[in-house]
Every structure is written in structure tokens, then in C-alpha cells.
Image: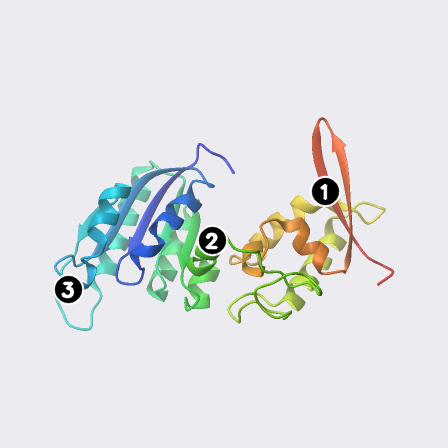
């Protein structure tokens, strides 16, 4: 990722717990520099009282939005208007929209149409339409789990894991059967005459096809061990210009 890319992080307090904030901000440092940190809600509500210390500790600007009408979400409107103002200011190259609400689907699409890189974050209950509208989507529960000092769960047979050996860690994730088909298709489309292609290219294309693709969804921290666990591919490593490059090929003997 380009460390100089500037991001606006906009958080829907009505749909996000304060326990996720550190993980949200830490994740976004992998993408670039956070220049806007704003969170939207009706701060007169007692339910949002727990946010006070979190906002101060992380220098997040709270935006007050009263609920004028019962049943209407004024917070969403304020967040969308702010996002468009930031877009037209041309001070950022990307946005992080933090919410599990499908109301932000059109906003994510609109920002992408304007050339913005959009990272969505929300809980596993987030509607698929919002997930698909983002360049990449991160599940908040997975971000928390990946930062816990526990044994990493795996999906390969015979490996140490926190869960049973299942095709899916969670129903909200892309099934491994679909992932395998996609990886094989990418290899067929991009490989050289011997059938090898860079694993990094496979990973980049996967994130474009599946915005919610993240190796941590399947209990891994790197793409290589995840692909190795699938037993459908050959992997080799080469050194070029003091860099270690990983290549992948469909295992024809399987």
C-alpha cells in the first residue's frame, strides 16, 4: 500500500461499538495516513456515553446530529453530506466508511465513481450490497480476533485450530469452494507458459473480485499458508534482486 495515501475515516456511532475503535484505526494505518477522523451520532443519548474517553484518547471528532423525526436516521444524512464535502475538497485519496448499515451503499459507490479508494468496515451482519460497493471490506469481529494473542485458527486437515475443520469459518465469508474456483481461474488467465503466476497477483485480483476477501477471515495472517492448506496448488519461492517472490501453479496431480 502507498503510505502517503490520505484517508477520511467516517464512523456511524449508531451501528458501531466503541470496543472496535483501536482495531479500526490500526487497520487503516496499513492503507495510509488518516487525515480525517469523524464519528456521527446524537451525543445527547445516554447510550453513546461510553464513547467519551475513546474519542479523547484517539483524537476523533464527534459530530452532533439530533434525531428530528422518529424512525428517520439523521446521522446517516449528516455523514453522507460530510463525505461529499470532503470529496470535493480533494484533500484525500480514500475513505473508510465504518457502519453495518446498507444505507451507505450508494455513498460507497459514488465515492468510487469519483476515483476514491473505499474501505468499508462493519460487523458480519452487514448487508452484501454495502460490502460489494466497497473496494475492500473488513469485518470488525475478524479484526479483533486477528489481534488477540491466541492460536491462529486454520481450515486445513490436521492443523491446530479453535474451530472444527469446516469449509467455512463463518457463513458470512466467501466459501472456500468458490475461493478455489476463483484462484484456479486467475491462475489460468495470468500464468506463464509453464503454468506459474505470482501469488501476489492472485491476491490482488481476489480482493477486486471479493471486496470482503481477507486471509484473516479463514484464520490465517498470510496468503501463502492459506493457499497451501487448500492442497490444490503447487507453490515455489524464488529470489530476485534481493526479494523473495512466491509463485503458484495448479496441482495437476491432484
- Crowd band around label 1 with a 10 angstrom C-alpha radius: few (<14), some (14–19), many (20+): some
Q: Which residue is mark 1?
A: 246
Asked if labels 3 and 1 touch by Cβ distance under 8 angstroms, the answer is: no
Q: Residue furthest right?
A: 253
- Crowd band around label 3 with a 10 angstrom C-alpha radius: few (<14), some (14–19), many (20+): few
Asked if labels 2 and 3 touch by Cβ distance under 8 angstroms, the answer is: no
Whether residue 252 sits left or right of residue 31 in the image: it is right
Residue 154 location (% of width, % of height): 62, 60
Name the residue: 64% across, 61% down: 160
Name the residue: 47% across, 57% down: 145
Q: Is residue 195 above or below residue 29?
A: below
Give the CA distance from mark 1 to mark 3.
53 Å
Q: Is residue 136 above or below residue 6?
A: below
Q: Secondary structure at mark 1?
A: strand
Whether residue 139 sits left or right of residue 54 in the image: it is right
- Which image quarter: residue 133? bottom left
Give the numbered dot on residue 104.
none
Asked if labels 1 and 2 touch by Cβ distance under 8 angstroms, the answer is: no
How many numbered circles are shown?
Answer: 3
- Can residue 99 be seen here? yes
Q: Earlier in the sequence, mark 1 or mark 3?
A: 3
Residue 244 location (% of width, % of height): 71, 35
- Which image quarter: residue 33? top left
Give the numbered dot on residue 148.
2
Residue 165 location (% of width, % of height): 64, 69
Give the CA distance from mark 2 to mark 1.
28 Å
Amino acid at each position: 500500500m502507498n503510505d502517503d495515501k490520505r484517508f477520511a475515516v467516517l464512523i456511524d456511532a449508531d451501528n458501531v461499538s466503541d470496543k472496535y475503535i483501536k482495531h479500526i484505526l490500526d487497520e487503516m494505518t496499513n492503507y495510509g495516513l488518516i487525515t480525517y477522523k469523524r464519528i456521527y451520532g446524537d451525543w445527547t443519548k445516554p447510550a453513546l456515553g461510553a464513547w467519551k474517553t475513546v474519542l479523547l484518547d484517539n483524537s476523533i471528532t464527534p459530530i452532533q446530529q439530533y434525531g428530528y423525526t422518529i424512525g428517520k436516521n439523521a446521522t446517516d444524512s449528516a455523514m453522507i453530506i460530510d463525505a461529499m464535502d470532503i470529496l470535493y475538497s480533494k484533500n484525500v485519496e480514500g475513505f473508510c466508511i465504518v457502519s453495518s448499515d446498507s444505507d451507505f451503499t450508494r455513498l460507497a459507490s459514488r465515492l468510487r465513481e469519483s476515483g476514491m479508494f473505499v474501505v468499508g468496515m462493519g460487523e458480519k451482519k452487514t448487508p452484501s450490497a454495502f460490502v460489494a460497493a466497497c473496494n475492500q471490506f473488513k469485518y470488525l469481529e475478524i479484526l479483533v480476533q486477528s489481534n488477540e494473542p491466541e492460536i491462529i485458527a486454520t481450515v486445513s486437515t490436521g492443523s491446530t485450530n479453535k474451530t472444527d475443520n469446516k469449509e467455512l469459518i463463518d457463513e458470512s465469508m466467501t466459501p472456500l469452494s468458490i475461493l478455489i474456483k476463483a484462484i484456479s481461474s486467475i491462475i489460468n488467465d495470468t500464468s506463464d507458459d509453464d503454468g506459474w503466476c505470482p501469488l501476489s497477483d492472485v491476491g490482488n485480483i481476489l480482493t477486486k473480485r471479493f471486496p470482503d476477501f481477507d486471509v484473516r477471515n479463514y484464520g490465517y495472517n498470510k496468503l501463502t499458508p492459506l493457499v497451501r492448506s487448500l492442497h490444490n496448488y503447487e507453490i515455489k519461492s524464488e529470489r530476485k534482486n534481493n526479494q523473495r517472490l512466491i509463485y503458484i501453479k495448479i496441482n495437476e496431480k491432484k
